[in-house]
Amino acid sequence: MFARIAPAHPGRVLAVVSAPQFPGQAVVDCQGLAPGSFATWKLRPSDTSEVQRRSFNHHLLHSLRLYRPDFVVLGVPRLDDQPSRILRERLHHLTVVLGIPVVERSVAEARHLLLGCRRGSTDDAMAAHLAEGFFPELAQFRSDKQTMPRRYRSHAFDAVALAIIALVERAPLSAAVIAKDAAFTMGTFNAALVSSTRRHFPDNL
């Protein structure tokens, strides 16, 4: 039996992009990117599916207890498959048991928010936009032309974008606070932020 987890901050979002080898996570709230939350959970491809699922559950429960999110976003990767769907089912079940609201969102939606399309002009366009528009500390994780580092971190960058889109929709003022000037010219971010703010505060706009 798991005890319910009280959120550390109102509006704190944990986003996890499920993948059978390199799931990515990020935690974002009104104070920015939670320290240490930008991470990749390495699941060994040599392990059986059940071992991978247990490892995934271990990482997930640790993050839920450590960061105590107010809301969880399950990211659907661009290349979704049966193992990814099974991992999301595990995550969904655990968050419900712990009393944390959870929703599934496509990574494509988050990319459209920041890039204006599903794919950017370069392979690391998402990473570049997140570092420039929101969290400069992520610049150190951008890869050059090495395939493995980019692939290793890609779902973590997608998780950051999903956390931002959730914050835009649920707590637009918090999203505005963490955004740098450059973010307001990216994709559909500004339009989505204005729309959400009007919805949350109809009497003030």
Image (cartoon, rainbow, N blue to C red):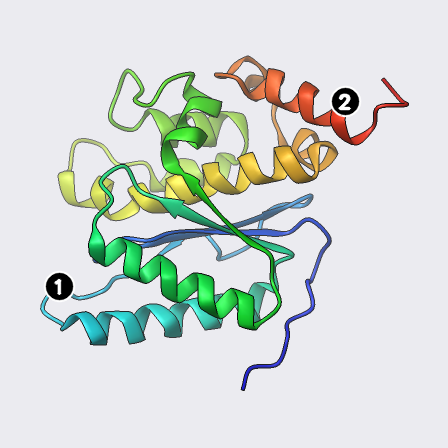
Indicate left or right for 154 with 149 as reference: right
Question: In this rendering, which labeled residue sits more in front, label 1 or label 2?
Answer: 2
The location of residue 143, given as percent across then percent down, is 26, 36
- Residue 55's quadrant in the figure? bottom left
Q: Secondary structure at mark 1?
A: loop
Indicate left or right for 66 with 141 as reference: right
In this orientation, which residue lies closer to the viewer: 201 or 189?
201
Please give the name of the residue rendered at 39% of the width and 37% of the height, measured from the top-left corner. 106
The location of residue 152, given as percent across then percent down, is 24, 48
The location of residue 77, given as percent across then percent down, is 31, 42
- Is residue 22 something one can see in this rendering? no
Indicate left or right for 64 with 90 as reference: right
Q: Residues within 10 Å of mark 1 (few under 14, many from 20)?
A: few
- Is residue 168 something one can see in this rendering? yes
Distance between the alpha carbons at the discs numbered 1 and 2: 46 Å
Q: Residue furthest right?
A: 203
> Which amino acid, mark 1?
Pro
Circle 2 sits on which residue?
Answer: 198
Residue 45: assigned label: 1
Q: Quadrant of the C terminus?
A: top right
The location of residue 198, given as percent across then percent down, is 76, 22
